[in-house]
Amino acid sequence: MIQSYNRNYPPHFAEKYKGIPYLFLDTPKFEMDENFHDVWNEYKKPVLRLRTDERDTMTFEEAAEYKKKNPKWTNQWTDAIWDGIVAHSTGLSDDRWSESRIDGYKVLPKFFKSLHDHLPILRLTQVLFWSNNRTVGMHKDFNEQFPWPSSIRIMIEDHNPEPTFFLMPIADDFKTIPLPEDRSNLIQLPHKDTPSNAFMYNNKNFAHGALKIEGYSKILCSLSIDYDWKKLEAILDRSIEKYGNNIV
């Protein structure tokens, strides 16, 4: 697991924000530069696994053999779950996946300026644009597993006719599962007419997954941020007061 600055979060966060699955952020809606779709269409590439990690230990060769026996299984070494672009990355970034890289600060200056203007950034370590082309099972992201809503995403666009991002409370021994066909008991993130297109979710006490509806798509921006703790607490408190904490 990446050594994260955010592991040193203020101790009172765990109790203060306990049980919150996700929060819409009280920020202006983030808008893209006019050239974004040209950039997306030119530089997006399938995102494939490059190396094993503590959770997914199957090598390329082992995965290929397993795929032969289980043809419906998604082999992350060869079957891309997402198309994506890396718009910014540092030495502290996640290197488990293939990259199509651009210099976001130069190519998308309006968007990157808005990130620094409106988010509690001490240091921005990674900016990804991803669009899932398969249904993604209920899982926890490998990094940023903290007991408060620490993982941040911006919905760039969503053309789906219904919500496709889901969360569920989990136990400590949770293992990744397929997205349930019956999703009535899952927490669903609204996708139309939302108060903000930026949200944060708890990646330790909740698993999340994404539905792929054929013929429709969405593009998410995934951010890795070393937080300014005072500014983060202020925006979390402001967001809860304005939009609620979504505890069910």
Image (cartoon, rainbow, N blue to C red):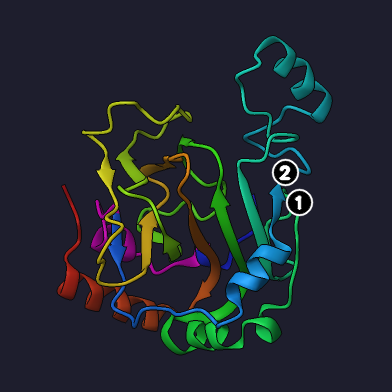
Mark 1: which amino acid? Ser
**What secondary structure is marked by label 1?**
loop
Mark 2: which amino acid? Leu
Q: Residues within 10 Å of mark 2 (few under 14, many from 20)?
A: many
Mark 2, residue position: 48
Residue at 67% across, 40% down: 80
Residue 19 is a magenta residue: yes
The answer to whether residue 115 is above or below residue 68 is below
In front of the other: 137 or 217: 217
Residue at 54% across, 67% down: 223
Q: Which region shows up in magenta? A: 7-21
21 lies left or right of 111: left
Q: Position of residue 48 (x, y in %)?
A: 72, 43
In front of the other: 152 or 164: 164
Q: Quadrant of residue 65?
A: top right
Asked whether the beta carbons under mark 2 and mark 1 sit within 8 Å of each other, the answer is yes
Mark 1, residue position: 98
- Whole-angstrom CA distance, mark 2 to mark 1, is 5 Å
Q: Position of residue 237 (x, y in %)?
A: 24, 75
Residue at 38% across, 51% down: 160
Q: Quadrant of residue 54?
A: top right
Q: Residue furthest right?
A: 61
**What secondary structure is marked by label 2?**
loop
247 lies left or right of 56: left
Count of numbered circles in the view: 2
In front of the other: 93 or 111: 111
